[in-house]
Amino acid sequence: MNQLEDVKEAKNKTLKIYQKYLELIYYTNDIVRKYPKCENFCLVQEIKNSNYSGLRNLMYAIKSYSTKDKLKYLNEFDICLNLLKIQIRISYKYKYITLQNYQSWSTLITDICNMLGGWINSCLKK
């Protein structure tokens, strides 16, 4: 019975991070529509690539049974989030987004990073 509860708790955590990440993607897509046209094939494309690479790695991590594979995908997901942080910082520096957009976007990413850190730690304990 205890093992079943652990499985349910793990699924609940992965669902939360998945839902939060989808929320980040929706927010990102809304924001990048406001970028200047000259950035559509540069910064906007890189931001979208980071988002969807992260989603791909998250999906692989959720579906992986091996802890080693799961950690590999979670680390790649972490790299995508770090790239996204840098791209958002650049967006703010060049005034493509407001301070409020920057703060909201950063908060979403920070929440996901915190969930990810917990997930990585739980994998390392096994």
Image: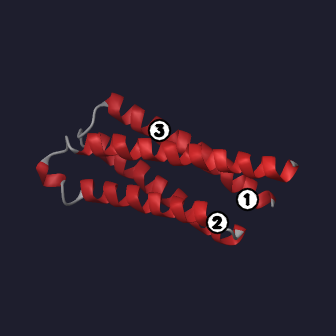
Identify which residue is drawn at 59% across, 60% down. 62
Determine whether 122 is above or below 108 in the image.
below
The residue to which callout 1 is attached is 123
Q: Residue furthest left?
A: 37
Whole-angstrom CA distance, mark 2 to mark 1, is 8 Å
Q: Earlier in the sequence, mark 2 or mark 1?
A: 2
Left or right of 59, for residue 12 = right
Disc 3 vs disc 2: which is toward the camera?
A: 2
Q: Residues within 10 Å of mark 3 (few under 14, many from 20)?
A: some
Q: Secondary structure at mark 1?
A: helix
The residue to which callout 2 is attached is 70
Whole-angstrom CA distance, mark 1 to mark 3, is 23 Å
Residue 113 visible from this viewpoint = no
* Horizontal and vertical percent position of residue 50: 39, 58
Whole-angstrom CA distance, mark 3 to mark 2, is 23 Å
* Marks 2 and 1 close (CB-CB < 8 Å): yes
- The C terminus, quarter of image: bottom right
Q: Residue furthest top?
A: 100
Q: Earlier in the sequence, mark 3 or mark 2?
A: 2
Amino acid at the residue labelled 2: Lys
* Horizontal and vertical percent position of residue 31: 27, 40
Q: Earlier in the sequence, mark 1 or mark 3?
A: 3
Amino acid at the residue labelled 1: Cys
The residue to which callout 3 is attached is 108
Amino acid at the residue labelled 3: Leu
Q: Secondary structure at mark 3?
A: helix
Q: Secondary structure at mark 2?
A: helix
Q: Residue furthest right?
A: 1
* Marks 1 and 3 close (CB-CB < 8 Å): no
Left or right of 57, for residue 7 = right
Identify which residue is drawn at 61% across, 43% down. 114
